[in-house]
Image (cartoon, grey):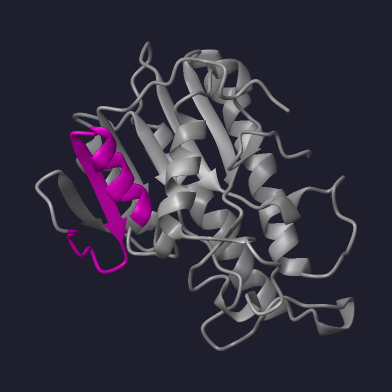
């Protein structure tokens, strides 16, 4: 067990959530405001504004770098203290789901999964990390998954999804090393939320054990609790919703 949870929590004055219209993203926005965050930049593809004066809606598309760059530029004057990337895909809109065998690998499906789960968050990091002033503390977190762990892989399968999350974890480690040179108070991590009752997990909920499915509100509270206790020494790693480190 890691030492997350043994430090005094700190809460952000401002935050940005990319993927605010999804189950976890929406719950994260609500939990941030309920916890006392004054401003929450809530990003979605449609730019729809959640109810509440604390929200600052913006539109972005993971497949459109210009939209991500524009969103970051709009926050440059007062960058958020926390940035959370709550995007991700397991089953594509056309029904293409995780491959259970190498025989089902489809290059087009794999490319789309990597574009959404790896490249999109990397572009958000590219532009959001670029607006962070030196000398200020900030946290950048992206939704990862335990199945992205190479050493903890005992079942195989789900090739594109596993590969996309493993690649994301590597990128987060790279970003943490690079930012530590110029922003020593930064925290850059991946988060494993558990199995959350959301559109992403819906097709795979029937076989879950009793109590394994987590409500979005509970998942958000768990993840924000972990983020609030992280320090720069823990940057570059992946933590689950209990605060335990996910092995690489």
Q: Magenta includes 38? A: yes
64 or 113: which is nearer to us? Answer: 113
Q: Magenta includes 207? A: no
Which quadrant of the structure image shows residue 77? Answer: top left
Residue 163, position in %: x, y?
74, 59
Residue 19, position in %: x, y?
38, 58
Residue 134, position in %: x, y?
38, 15
Seen as rendered, the residue at the extreme front is 210
Seen as rendered, the residue at the extreme left is 53
Start-end of magenta stretch:
27-50
Residue 45, position in %: x, y?
31, 66
Judge left or right: residue 94 versus residue 75: right
* Above or below, 70 relative to 127: below
47 or 39: which is nearer to us? Answer: 39
* Above or below, 80 relative to 159: above
At horizontal 50% and vertical 51% (from top left) the residue drawn is 121
Judge left or right: residue 226 versus residue 35: right
Judge left or right: residue 17 versus residue 143: left
Quadrant of image for the C terminus? top right
At horizontal 17% and vertical 48% (from top left) the residue drawn is 56
At horizontal 65% and vertical 70% (from top left) the residue drawn is 111
Quadrant of image for the N terminus? top right
Tell me how many marks there are. Answer: 0
At horizontal 44% and vertical 27% (from top left) the residue drawn is 228
Residue 9, can we see it? yes
* Above or below, 51 relative to 173: below
């Amino acid at each position: 067990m890691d030492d997350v949870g043994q430090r005094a929590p700190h809460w952000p004055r401002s935050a940005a959530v990319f993927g605010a219209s999804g189950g976890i993203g929406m719950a994260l926005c609500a939990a941030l405001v309920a916890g006392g965050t004054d401003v929450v930049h809530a990003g979605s593809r449609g730019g729809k504004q959640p109810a509440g004066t604390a929200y600052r809606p913006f539109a972005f598309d993971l497949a459109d770098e210009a939209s991500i760059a524009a969103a970051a530029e709009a926050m440059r004057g007062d960058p958020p203290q926390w940035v959370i990337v709550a995007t991700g895909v397991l089953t594509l809109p056309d029904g293409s789901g995780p491959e259970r065998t190498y025989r089902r690998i489809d290059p087009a499906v794999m490319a789309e999964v990597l574009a959404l789960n790896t490249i999109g968050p990397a572009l958000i990091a590219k532009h959001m990390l670029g607006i962070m002033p030196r000398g200020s503390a900030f946290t950048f977190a992206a939704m990862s998954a335990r199945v992205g762990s190479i050493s903890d892989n005992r079942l195989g399968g789900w090739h594109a999804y596993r590969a996309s999350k493993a690649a994301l974890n590597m990128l987060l480690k790279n970003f943490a090393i690079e930012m530590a040179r110029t922003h020593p108070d930064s925290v850059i991590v991946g988060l494993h939320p558990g199995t959350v009752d959301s559109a992403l997990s819906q097709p795979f909920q029937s076989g879950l054990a009793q109590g394994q499915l987590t409500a979005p509100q509970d998942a958000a509270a768990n993840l924000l609790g972990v983020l609030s206790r992280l320090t720069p020494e823990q940057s570059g790693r992946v933590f689950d919703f209990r605060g335990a480190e996910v092995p690489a």
